[in-house]
Amino acid sequence: MGGLRETFVDELRDLFDAEKQLLKALPKLAKAAENEDLKAAFEQHIEETEGQIERLKEVFQLFDEQPRGKKCKGMEGLIEEGAEMIEEEAGDAALICAAQKAEHYEIATYGSLSAWAKLLGEDQAVELLEENLQEEKAADEKLTEIAESVVNVEEEQEGEEDKPVARRGAKTAKR
């Protein structure tokens, strides 16, 4: 099982770097967010990410490995896309999309690492990874909730303002 252990540690290093990259990017997303709920969600996830990094350090210790990252090109690309959206002032819906791409990357990786830790008989590592996984899933659900209840409605209303009155729909045109 040396191959699985090596793969596990390699992916753990990748995820460790991904979390550290995200920790640097989240304040920029929070600053760019216009919706207060979205801003608060990004700020809350900063705290969660700090805790996730600490739990990853514990997992490294369980595997007698130094907690150090390996350049995560996947997260680097996702953060780059998010930075472009901020630069373009693409709006909160675009920020949510960028953040959810990162969340889904993390969810996939935590799921794999948790399964592998279980196969390796590292129950304590499984618990730590599952805690991080559940936080990532909750963050993703919160972003979806914000998108569905507030942000997408705001974006749609802004789009309506740009249309001529006759094209907004029967109720609006009769005013």
Image (cartoon, rainbow, N blue to C red):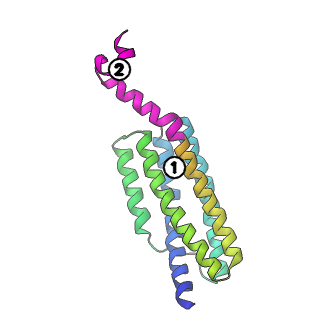
Q: Secondary structure at mark 1?
A: helix
Q: Nearer the viewer, residue 41 or 153?
A: 153
Residue 138, compared with residue 34, is above or below; it is: below
Q: Main secondary structure of the magenta part?
A: helix
Q: Quadrant of residue 165?
A: top left
Is residue 20 in view from this perspective?
A: no
Q: Which residues are magenta?
A: 146-175
Callout 1–callout 2 Cβ contact below 8 Å: no
x then y, percent, for residue 162 = 31, 25
Mark 2 neighbour class, 10 Å CA radius: few under 14, some 14 to 19, many 20 or more: few
Residue tagged 1 = 27
- Name which residue lies at 62% across and 78% down: 117
x then y, percent, for residue 163 = 30, 24
x then y, percent, for residue 19 = 53, 63
Mark 1 neighbour class, 10 Å CA radius: few under 14, some 14 to 19, many 20 or more: some
Q: Quadrant of residue 127?
A: bottom right
